Image (cartoon, rainbow, N blue to C red):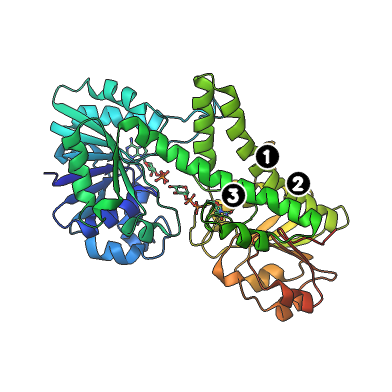
């Protein structure tokens, strides 16, 4: 019976997933630990700090469990020592230097955490991989853990499939939970915890390597769907077809399905790019060069999805952005999150700045500091040319703007008061809707020129 759990890493995955587990498993006591004191203070809402991540419904779940069977602290060693089961939820970014730079996962944090587990664990301990890892990481993990003299370990892979912005609902009602391992009793120990709130038909058990590969595969397939529909959006614009109609038509086919076919400025978030690179590295490692090239194309197309937006804007605004003001609506990689990791807005805004534009950026959840650290340098590492500021409202963002660019699908952009916004803008004004996320017909009725992703007929 598992009664004491430790989760190393209080990030976007560790925090919400342990909160939901604690909420549905009153019999287990969970300690979420992190080396980052500020993050832990924020999770504890100390000194008026707001939670480190924004996720609808998260605060309500925390209110029920924090201080009861869920605790946040920086006592990594103590929590490991007390635990029967340790979840590894640390970050695994792409390596930036050395062997495999640019595609292999950087396992520094995993390795460090594994050494801490080897040093501090006592007795029989189950170690659960939660971070997305290259296939066969468990081999390396085992070698480090085997150095322990005080504990015996079993390793499980339990990748998390939740998406940001819908994390609480995804965690409470998952399509499936995946538990991979080599020992049935250990697999069942974790499956038994999930059985507290997940129907057993949705708990899938596999071997370790299948679980590790399934997570990479799921993200690669999802990313591929977005790149595919974005490619079709480009064809729609050139031919007079409408991607919304194409989407409806193909989504009605059961074999294809309606989800994950929304065109946009390219996918962002912490997973897709990193996991595709991870898969590409794996394919190359095993000499499967065509396979590597196939998946790299999905990434290349994502780069194209982003680049073409800034290029199209420059073209529409008479070939130069110097002395032009652009209101950018949305900076997060998608709605309902404050996360900006790999957000398409970063590259697009950098390109616009590079062309001399002055940007006024609105986002309901992303703070000033995050924008500043991402935009003060251009892609080539040089200081950005144009200027940018965070706007407190959509209205102030549009004051004096030559164009409005919608990059994130925040619900507050769906119905904008275009009569008011158009009167604040410099004429002739443009609206570029890269998400099909606003009432564009109304913008047109107030004299604004418009471009919408995947809608034919502009050229
Ligand atoms: C993703 C996976 O969905 C999740 O299962 C995995 O565990 C982590 O990676 P996340 O990155 O949080 O989750 O968000 P997701 O909703 O998948 O969106 C990723 C990106 O794709 C966003 O930039 C989003 O705007 C874009 N997207 C998504 C589209 O452009 N069109 C779509 O139809 C869906
Ligand atoms: P994810 O989106 O996968 O949750 P994050 O970057 O949001 O990733 O969170 C990972 C967290 O793991 C960070 O808060 C980081 O400080 C923490 N972390 C990394 N290594 C360790 C470690 N050895 N011990 C404790 N916490 C760690």
Provide the residue designation for mark 2. Answer: 354
Q: Residue at x 66, y 59 (%)?
A: 246
| Residue 156 spot, x, y in % from top left | 27, 35
Mark with earlier residue (3, 2): 3
- In the image, residue 374 sits, relative to residue 447, either above or below, namely above
> Which quarter of the figure is the C terminus placed in?
bottom right
Q: Is residue 356 visible?
A: no
Residue 45, picture quadrant = bottom left
- Rendered image quadrant of residue 114: top left
Ligand 1 under 8 Å from disc 3 Cβ: yes
- Quadrant observed for ligand 2 in the rendered image: top left
Instruction: Give the Cα separation between the discs numbered 3 and 1.
Output: 24 Å
User: For disc 1, does the CB lie below 8 Å from ligand 1?
Assistant: no
Q: Can you give x and y, in whole percent of width and height, for residue 342 in the image?
A: 56, 45
At mark 2, the secondary structure is helix
**Which disc, if any, is residue 226?**
3
In the picture of the structure, the residue carrying the numbered disc 1 is 379
| Depth order, front residue of 231/275 | 231
Residue at disc 2, CB closer than 8 Å to ligand 1: no
Which quarter of the figure has residue 136?
A: top left
Q: Are marks 3 and 2 in contact (CB under 8 Å)?
A: no
């Amino acid at each position: 019976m598992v009664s004491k759990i430790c989760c190393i890493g209080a990030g976007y995955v560790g925090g919400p997933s342990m909160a939901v587990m604690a909420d549905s498993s009153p019999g287990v006591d969970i300690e979420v630990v992190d080396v980052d004191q500020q993050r832990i203070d924020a999770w504890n809402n100390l000194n008026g700090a707001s939670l480190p991540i924004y996720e609808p419904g998260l605060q309500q779940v925390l209110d029920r469990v924090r201080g009861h069977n869920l605790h946040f602290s920086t006592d990594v060693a103590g929590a490991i020592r007390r635990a029967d089961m340790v979840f590894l939820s640390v970050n695994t970014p792409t390596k930036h230097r050395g062997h495999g730079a640019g595609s292999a996962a950087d396992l520094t944090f995993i390795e460090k955490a594994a050494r801490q587990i080897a040093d501090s664990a006592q007795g029989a301990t189950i170690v659960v991989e939660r971070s997305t890892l290259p296939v066969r990481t468990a081999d390396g993990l085992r070698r480090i853990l085997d150095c322990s003299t005080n504990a015996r370990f079993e390793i499980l892979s339990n990748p998390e499939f939740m998406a940001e912005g819908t994390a609480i609902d995804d965690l409470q009602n998952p399509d499936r939970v995946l538990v991979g391992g080599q020992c049935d009793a250990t697999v069942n120990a974790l499956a038994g915890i999930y059985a507290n709130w997940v129907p057993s038909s949705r708990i899938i058990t596999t071997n370790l390597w299948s679980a590790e590969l399934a997570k990479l595969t799921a993200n690669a397939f999802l990313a591929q769907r977005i790149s595919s529909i974005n490619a079709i959006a480009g064809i729609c614009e050139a031919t007079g077809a409408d991607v919304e109609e194409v989407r409806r038509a193909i989504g009605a086919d059961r074999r294809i399905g309606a989800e994950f076919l929304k065109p946009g400025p390219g996918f962002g978030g912490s997973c897709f790019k990193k996991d595709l690179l991870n898969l590409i590295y794996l394919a190359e490692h095993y000499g499967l060069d065509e396979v590597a090239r196939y998946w790299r194309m999905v990434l290349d197309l994502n780069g194209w999805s982003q680049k073409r937006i800034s290029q199209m804007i420059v073209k529409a605004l008479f070939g130069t952005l110097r002395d032009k003001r652009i209101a950018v609506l949305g900076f997060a990689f998608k709605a309902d999150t404050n996360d900006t990791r790999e957000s398409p807005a970063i590259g697009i805004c950098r390109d616009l700045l590079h062309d001399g534009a002055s940007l006024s950026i609105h986002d309901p959840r992303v703070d000033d500091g995050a924008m500043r650290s991402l935009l003060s340098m251009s892609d080539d590492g040089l200081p950005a040319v144009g200027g940018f500021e965070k706007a407190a409202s959509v209205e102030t963002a549009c004051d004096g703007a030559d164009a409005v660019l919608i990059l994130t699908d925040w619900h507050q952009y769906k119905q904008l008061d275009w009569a008011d916004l158009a009167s604040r803008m410099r004429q002739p004004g443009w609206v570029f809707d890269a998400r099909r996320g606003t009432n564009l017909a109304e913008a047109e009725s107030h004299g604004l020129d418009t471009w919408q992703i995947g809608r034919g007929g502009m050229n």
